[in-house]
Amino acid sequence: MQYTEIMVRYGELSTKGKNIKDFINQLGGNTTKALHDFPDVRVHPKRDRMHITLNGTEPKPVLERLKLVFGIQSFSPVVQLPKDIEAVYAAAVEMMQEIYQAGMTFKVQTKRADKEFPMDTNAINREVGGAVITALPDIKVDVKNPDIELLVDVRNNGIFLSSLTIKGAGGFPVGTAGKGIMMLSGGIDSPVAAYLGMKRGVDMEMIHFFSPPYTTQQALAKAKQLTAVLAQSVGAIKFIQIPFTEIQETIKEKVPEGYLMTIQRRMMLRLSVLMAQKRNGLAIFNGEALGQVASQTMESMMAINDVTTMPIIRPVVSMDKTEIIKVAEEIGTFDLSIMPFEDCCTIFAPPSPKTRPNLEKTRQFEKLIDVDGLIERALAAVEISTIRPGEDYMNPEEAVFAELL
């Protein structure tokens, strides 16, 4: 069956009233970017549906990519036919023959936007269903819970036929909820947090702190590869890499061991906020889950958040590790996240970090380091790049071998 287009349904976007045009336009732009490597595909966002014309492109990889685009509730591959009922019969039979398996049931569901078409919905349901039964005598009709629902959509510009409805990612189009800055480590939690923030429409940019020579180029490459996976939903994501070696060495030298982690996190947050302010970000996102590690107790969060008034959003804060891992596996980041390349959050980790750091002591110990100078030098060496889906930043087998040398 040669499908001619994909029909996209909006779902939650339909609740947006007067703002729906802006949401649909954003979704159209995001979808175009996500499908940038399919040169013949064209995206046509309309108020009620979005139509993606394939122009001969194989539909399967396009369908797989659409599953990742936020703002899409569901979608269906569709065949456009002339307003000729005989053509509908033939296409319906061909479509059903491709997907029918013994014991399956079906029904025909018709929508008739073109009221001038000579057959009404009941007649179309009956006659198309009859054509299918004639070609497939063993198939049964089930109008309440069919295995296959054959959809016939009669519009002014033709008749559109489909038999498959695929669930989309849901949520809102990325870019409709403002810009956020994600503190992306190489672990399991922060990519999931980024994904969940993007699902609510946040235009996410990634900040990654790296500390050569204590962290390797493969650790940096892993963070970029995780970003490339997340970029499948939007087409491209900005990646901001900030050197953190001098800051970590200075903190280790001058700050009491129990407060190393707290003051490191405070410095990371300061740098993230400054980058957000430069790049018009409205909030900082991270992958903290309450109580999971020493830096994620409420006392630690309070001591770290003390350095800013910018909102700190934690999409996975109430999730347990099993729930987070399940999402990571679903979105394709888990296998990357568990690759054994240490990031700067794990080096210099004290054996007994303070789980309930005292805020006044934290402020006093921080005075032992040159906060402003360290931040100034780190910001002067920031590198920003654009990460796109499909780009390969690391060869996993070569990377593991290199780490063993």
Image (spheres, rainbow, N blue to C red):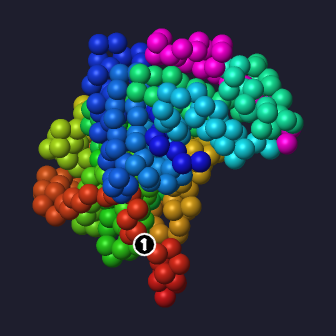
- Whether residue 258 is visible, yes or no, is no
> Callout 1: helix, strand or loop?
loop
Q: Residue at x 33, y 76 (%)?
A: 213
Q: Is 337 left, or right, of 206 in this rendering?
A: right
Residue at 44 percent of width and 52 percent of height: 56
Q: Which residues are magenta?
A: 102-124
Are there few (<14), some (14-19), or many (20+) residues within 10 Å of tag 1? some
Residue 307 is a magenta residue: no
- The residue positioned 59% from the left and 48% from the top of the image is 1
In which quadrant of the rendered view does residue 281 lie? Answer: top left
Q: Specify whether 336 is left or right of 221.
A: right
Name the kind of residue labelled 1 in the image: Met
Q: Nearer the viewer, residue 223 or 139?
A: 139
Q: Is residue 119 magenta?
A: yes
Residue drawn 41% across the image and 15% down it: 15
Residue 384 position (above or below residue 127): below
Residue indicated by mark 1: 394
Is 23 located above or below residue 321 in the figure? above
Q: Position of residue 23 (x, y in %)?
A: 32, 26
Residue 84 visible in image: yes
Picture coordinates of residue 92, whole percent (x, y): 65, 35
